[in-house]
Image (cartoon, grey):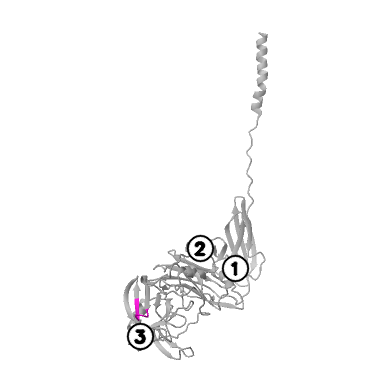
Amino acid sequence: MKSGRLGALMMLVATAPLVLAGCTSEPRKKKEAARPAPPTVAITPAANANNIPVSAEIGAKVTDGKITAVSLVDAKGTKVAGAMRPDGSTWVPSAPLKHSQVYNAEVTATNPGGTITQKSRFTTMAKPAQRVTTHLYLDNDRTYGVAMPVTVAFEPAVPKEARADVQRRLFVNTEPTQPGAWSWVEDGSQIYYRAPDFWQPGTRISVRSALDGLPMGKEGHGDADRTATAKIGNNVKLEIDSSTKQMSVFQDDKLTRKIPVSLGKPSTPTSSGNMVIMEKHEATTFDTRGEPNGGYVVDVEDAQRLTWGGEFIHAAPWSVGDQGNTNVSHGCTNVSNENADWLMRTTQVGDLVTVKGTEVQLQPGNGWTAWNVGWDEYVKGSALPVPADLKPESKPAPAPSGSAATNGPAVPSGPAAPTPSNRGG
């Protein structure tokens, strides 16, 4: 009996430490992940900056985070409206800031580590002494043709080193969406915006030329912030052939009328190329005194401008006998009174006019010449990278109703600034 109790006791002692060890062991703790640091934000304009242009945008360089809010108020606490650029690079005020005013900017950025808000107080510059005159050739609530390029012109011209900054301040939205690109005339006197193909009828185009106070090189600062929303109307295109002395009028790509014409005589030839109707006048006066090959004054009816240099389509009752067989004008397209009146009722500013077979080519910048080159040449005139989905595909310049258009050279040269001439004739 003793030996049995002793064996049981020894077994109990031997197993006890195992039981105690199992009861007192602690579970292994999981290592907690390090919490990331909050983002860092650097604002422009910088704190206490002075002499800031009224075209300033609120920029923020964010490290390890994203911007979640931007606020800008003036010295009275009035909030300034604005929105981020689609690429998130800057916040753009909806209107130019005021001169010689103090503004307070706040930018908030967030990441998993937290949220941070940085502030900047800056003062805008006084009104500049020198201004660059700008023109936005798009009127609010007006209807244009399918070839209407958004055109902004500058007097004096914009130097190359300032063109990218100017282009960044030009905004276009279309409904339905039809992406396009900007392209400069080489001398910097004009910049055009168009899509790879003509606008769809019914498209609404909203434009903001936000150039007030923008530095444009030694010539000064931009003069105004201009906006317009317009509509694209019917698809009307004109094709003029010097070899046949005929104008073909296409509506929705269907030939609706043939019109006899007389173009420029050899000493004052009409330009060949893709032009756009720029102006329409029920009556105007051509005064060419002091101009080469000029010296006459004549009143004309139903005149439609095609170039800055003074080429028009207009009524010319004095040349009806030559229309359809002989070129006798001073560079204009002469038609009869009846046909000129019908054209005025049929066409719109922004309609494409293609002329072919004459002695000279349309010069870039002599009018709204955005369609006088193919897309691959056109986008070379952009001062900023073209979006990938708009990269050139060697498309020719579109022509009316499927006929071949005469292409001019790529966007070099052009008049110093758009100065309309009523050379006419």
Which residue lies most toward the top here?
A: 1
Q: Amino acid at mark 2?
A: Pro
- Residue 40: mark: none
Which one is closest to the eye, mark 3 or mark 1?
A: 3
Rendered view: 307 above or below 297: above
Q: Secondary structure at mark 3?
A: loop
Residue to which mark 1 is pinned: 56
| Residue 356 image offset from top left, x and y in percent | 39, 77
Rendered view: 413 above or below 198: below
| Residue 316 image offset from top left, x and y in percent | 36, 86
Q: Which residues are magenta?
A: 241-248
- Residue 387: mark: 2
Q: Secondary structure at mark 1?
A: loop
Q: In the figure, residue 395 lies in which quadrant?
A: bottom left
Binning the other alpha carbons within 10 Å of mark 1 as few (below 14), some (14 to 19) or many (20 upward) gives some
Q: CA distance from mark 2 to mark 3?
A: 47 Å
Left or right: where does residue 378 sit relative to residue 317? right
Tell me which residue sits at (48%, 70%) in the image.
377
Q: CA distance from mark 2 to mark 1?
A: 24 Å
Residue to which mark 3 is pinned: 326
- Quarter of the rendering occupied by the C terminus: bottom left
Q: Amino acid at mark 3?
A: Thr
Instruction: In this rendered view, identify the residue nearer to me: 368 or 413.
Output: 413
Tell me which residue sits at (64%, 67%) in the image.
122
Q: In the figure, residue 76 lies in which quadrant?
A: bottom right
Binning the other alpha carbons within 10 Å of mark 3 as few (below 14), some (14 to 19) or many (20 upward) gives some
- Quarter of the rendering occupied by the N terminus: top right
Q: Amino acid at mark 1?
A: Ala
